Image (cartoon, rainbow, N blue to C red):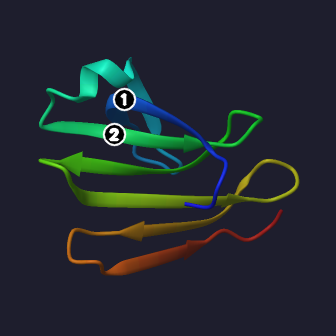
Amino acid sequence: MSAGPDCRYFLSYAGVGLPFKLITPLGEDQVANRNTYIKGYFDTGGSLLGFDKLVYGEVELAHRYEYAADGRLRRAEIIDIDGESTVLEYPAG
């Protein structure tokens, strides 16, 4: 992630559409003893820029989101455990 996003921790995510919704916030002190958690990155307006799903300290899944000026999702990149990337583009309008 680029420098500066607000980083927060969550237990899981929900939804079938993108961007996923991160649920069940965790304090930074709560992730030290967890095997699995989500590390979410947010811009200053609170939009989700992406997240990493960590399992035993390794990134198992990562999402990165870009938004259009009107706030709608413009692009999503999904990176799996093997580092394979899938990019989804959403047309304007």
What amino acid is labelled 2 in the image? Ile
Task: State the CA–CA distance, disc 2 to disc 1.
Answer: 5 Å
Local SS, label 2: strand
State the image coordinates of residue 90 (x, y, percent, origin top left).
Answer: 66, 68
Q: Residue furthest bottom?
A: 84
Instruction: Determine which quarter of the picture holds residue 12.
Output: top left
Which quadrant would the C terminus be assigned to in this image? bottom right
Q: Is residue 35 left or right of residue 62?
A: left
Q: Is residue 55 left or right of residue 90?
A: left
Q: Which mark is residue 38?
A: 2
60 up-or-down from 56: above or below: below
Badge 2: few (under 14), some or many (20 or more) residues near its Cα, within 10 Å? many
Badge 1: few (under 14), some or many (20 or more) residues near its Cα, within 10 Å? many
Q: Is residue 92 left or right of residue 37?
A: right
Residue 36 in view in this figure? yes
Q: Is residue 41 left or right of residue 25?
A: right
Residue 26 in view in this figure? no
- Residue appearing at x 41%, y 67% in the figure: 78
State the image coordinates of residue 17 (x, y, percent, origin top left).
Answer: 48, 48
Residue toward you, 61 or 9: 9
Q: Residue furthest right?
A: 69
- Residue appearing at x 63%, y 46% in the figure: 5
- Residue appearing at x 12%, y 37% in the figure: 35
Which quadrant would the N terminus be assigned to in this image? bottom right
Instruction: Determine which quarter of the picture holds residue 67.
Output: bottom right
- Residue appearing at x 36%, y 29% in the figure: 10
N-term mark: 2 or 1: 1
Q: Are marks 2 and 1 in contact (CB under 8 Å)?
A: yes
State the image coordinates of residue 4 (x, y, percent, origin top left).
Answer: 67, 48
Q: Which mark is residue 61?
A: none
List the residue tagged with mark 1. 10
What amino acid is labelled 1 in the image? Phe
